[in-house]
Amino acid sequence: MPNWNPWQGCQKTSEGCKNCYIYTYDGKDGKNVGQVFKTKYFDLPAQRKKNGDYKLKSDDIVYTCFYSDFFIELADTWRTDAWVYIKERSDLNFLFLTKRIHRFHECIPPDWNDGYDNVIVGVSVENQKMADDRCSLLKNYPIKHKGIICQPLIGPIDLENYLDGMEFVTVGGEQGQNGRSCDYNWILSLREQCIRHNVPFTFRQTGTYFIKDDVHYKIARNDQSKQARLANIDYYPTR
Ligand code: SF4
């Protein structure tokens, strides 16, 4: 799946940002990650090959703005043009995650109406407080495709009030040496909630510090996704 990073850099906004991977990786050379800049890939969806074909193939899901937040204030002057590319490429599906869903009305294009068919919006929530703040907004906003990412999951979350209308829930622990522990019981609870509401559920990865049956594990980076797959608890409704 292709990535599109029209801008890069971000500013921390809640507890889930504490060990943000772009601060960990981009910031390690002393780079100012809090400075948001437009990248050379800004117009990637509109870029064409020598033969005239688009560089991004039709029908792909494009992971959008995973090195920033699509709704960050510091990109307000560039977002209008980004929407133009998204609209031009109605043959692609653009997925972005945000911790700034409260800015929805300031950030959508004028012709959004009840949403673009090719845009999937996920809110990222790490604990109950952020789930209540962000999912209550997401639930009521006019968006054609929406979902919830509980990653890094740093506490138990009750999503029951927000699941109807969601197309996916993805969960995972926090990665890195300073990651906060994730308890398997929190993950199983979210899975049960998804099953009750017929929402697809994916356990993406364990994170570094993982608790199962009250035993604390430290899991190597390369094994975190593998262990989640081995748990074999993903759920896809048959509807
Ligand atoms: S909003 Fe996302 S990208 Fe931005 S600092 Fe927080 S975790 Fe990192």
Image: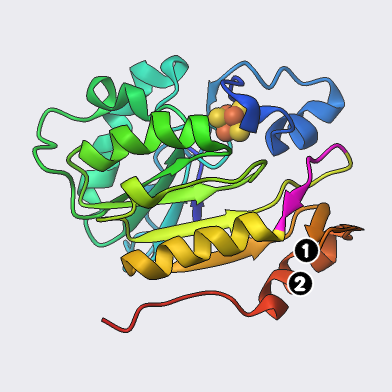
Q: Position of residue 51 (x, y in %)?
A: 36, 65
Judge by depth and name the residue closer to the eye, 91 or 11: 11
| Magenta span | 178-183
**Measured along the vertical axis of the image, is residue 215 above or below residue 81?**
below
Graded by Cα atoms within 10 Å as few (under 14), some (14 to 19) or many (20 or more), the crowding at tag 1 reads many
Name the element at disc 2: helix
Identify residue type, mark 2.
Answer: Gln
Q: Give the residue at mark 1.
A: 224
Predominant SS of the magenta segment: loop
Q: Give the residue at mark 2.
A: 227
- Farthest residue in the front direction? 214
- Taking the image as drawn, is residue 1 in sight? no
Query: Is disc 1 in contact with disc 2, using a CB cutoff of under 8 Å?
Result: yes
**Magenta stretch: includes residue 112:** no
Identify residue type, mark 1.
Answer: Gln
Could you say which quadrant of the image residue 84 lies in?
top left
- Taking the image as drawn, is residue 205 in sight? yes
